[in-house]
């Protein structure tokens, strides 16, 4: 499925993308407790609803407190949604990330009844990579699914460092590396002494770090240490409020009050950690979310504007153009 698996040395060598130094430093310490991959083979029309994250964790990574989920679309096209949220579309080469392991629904281009995923994942005496097959026999979508256990604060849902689901489209040469490495890692599934399927974590850690670097490269002031800022209790609390409700009309005084700190201290900590005041960070985070919604959803500009805190499409467009030099509609078409 996908590219032929590379040899181990080539698969483990992260491509030279010249990513921002701050992200390299702050993401370099991520360590997985365990990882498991499975293959999904879906034919149009198809749609499924996943089990709750804690159930998936217990079945696929027993003992894990938190599981994040990756879906690499090797072939075809699909959508994913969390709860009643919008559908995010992904195509071949894209990586769908569910950083908090939320229950979600997925489906293809054709209409189909949604079935529960649990019964589709049988638990035989697997001798190879676990797999799922489902669908009505039409066009094929191949997906490599990764389930990774990691207790890093970055994946604490209370921190809100990420949306519940987002799609990453790696640029070349990272795209080929991510795809080949996911295929290779999936091929390393083996049963341990307890009878649980596991994957050596070194390569999955590299894949995780690379995909997050690509996603966070557009986060406000990523080069100053976005991830590191999550370890500062003053900054992290304000960031979590902004991430949870980007549409709210936040003021610095309100953010400081909810964190039981002074306005001057909050402003100083933001400038030290992120190189900008809190309200500028709020604007940058809104634009970061806008990029994701413009890229992977069919939401109109008015809906996106309201989702991220702008009362009108015009106000949103002006803010977007100030930051990126072009209107959101032009930016969306070019991508």
Image (spheres, rainbow, N blue to C red):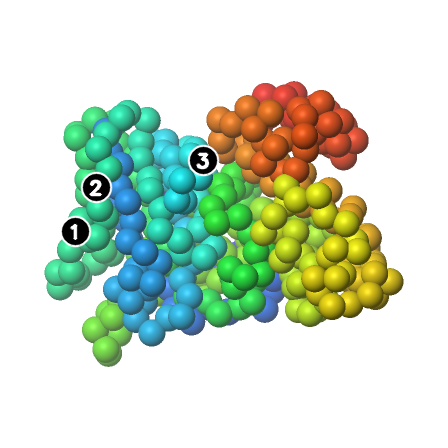
Locate residue 179, reporting x and y percent.
Answer: 43, 45
In the shown orientation, is residue 244 left or right of residue 102? right
- The mark nearer the N terminus, 3 or 1, is 3
In the image shown, does 245 or 226 lie closer to the viewer?
A: 245
Work out whether 248 lies above or below 186: above
Cα distance, mark 3 to mark 1? 25 Å
In the shown orientation, is residue 37 left or right of residue 171? left
Disc 1: which residue: 119
Residue 6 visible in the displayed image: no
Locate residue 56, reporting x and y percent.
Answer: 30, 60
Disc 2: which residue: 115
Query: Which residue is farthest left?
Result: 124
Residue 322 visible in the displayed image: yes
Instruction: Say few, some or many: other residues with alpha carbon within 10 Å of mark 2 (under 14 / 14 to 19 / 20 or more).
Output: some
Disc 3: which residue: 86
Locate residue 159, reporting x and y percent.
Answer: 58, 61
Q: Quadrant of residue 68?
A: bottom left
Work out whether 51 lies above or below 257: above
Query: Which residue is farthest bottom?
Result: 193
- Please name the residue shown 33% across and 39% down the image: 106
């Amino acid at each position: 499925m996908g590219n032929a698996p590379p040899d181990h040395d080539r698969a483990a060598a992260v491509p030279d993308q010249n990513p921002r130094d701050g992200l390299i430093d702050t993401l370099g310490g991520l360590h997985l407790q365990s990882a498991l991959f499975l293959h999904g083979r879906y034919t149009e029309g198809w749609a499924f609803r996943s089990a709750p994250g804690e159930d998936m964790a217990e079945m696929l990574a027993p003992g894990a407190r938190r599981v994040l989920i990756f879906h690499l679309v090797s072939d075809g096209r699909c959508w994913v949604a969390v709860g009643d949220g919008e559908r995010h579309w992904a195509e071949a080469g894209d990586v769908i990330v569910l950083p908090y392991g939320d229950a979600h629904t997925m489906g293809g281009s054709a209409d189909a009844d949604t079935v529960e995923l649990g019964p589709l994942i049988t638990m035989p005496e697997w001798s190879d990579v676990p797999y799922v097959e489902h669908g009505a026999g039409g066009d094929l979508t191949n997906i490599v699914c990764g389930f990774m256990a990691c207790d890093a604060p970055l994946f604490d849902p209370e921190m809100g460092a990420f949306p519940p689901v987002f799609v990453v489209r790696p640029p070349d040469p990272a795209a080929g590396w991510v795809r080949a490495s996911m295929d290779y890692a999936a091929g390393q599934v083996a049963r341990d002494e307890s009878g649980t399927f596991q994957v050596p974590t070194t390569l999955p850690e590299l894949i995780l770090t690379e995909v997050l670097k690509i996603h966070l490269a557009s986060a406000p002031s990523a080069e100053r240490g976005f991830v590191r800022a999550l370890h500062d209790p003053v900054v992290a609390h304000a960031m979590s409020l902004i991430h949870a409700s980007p549409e709210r009309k936040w003021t610095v005084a309100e953010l400081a009050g909810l964190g039981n700190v002074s306005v001057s201290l909050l402003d100083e900590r933001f400038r030290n950690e992120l190189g900008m005041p809190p309200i500028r960070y709020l604007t940058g985070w809104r634009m970061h979310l806008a990029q994701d919604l413009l890229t992977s959803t069919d939401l109109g500009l008015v809906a996106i504007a309201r989702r991220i805190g702008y009362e009108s499409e015009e106000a949103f467009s002006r803010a977007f153009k100030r930051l990126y030099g072009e209107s959101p509609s032009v930016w969306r078409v070019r991508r």
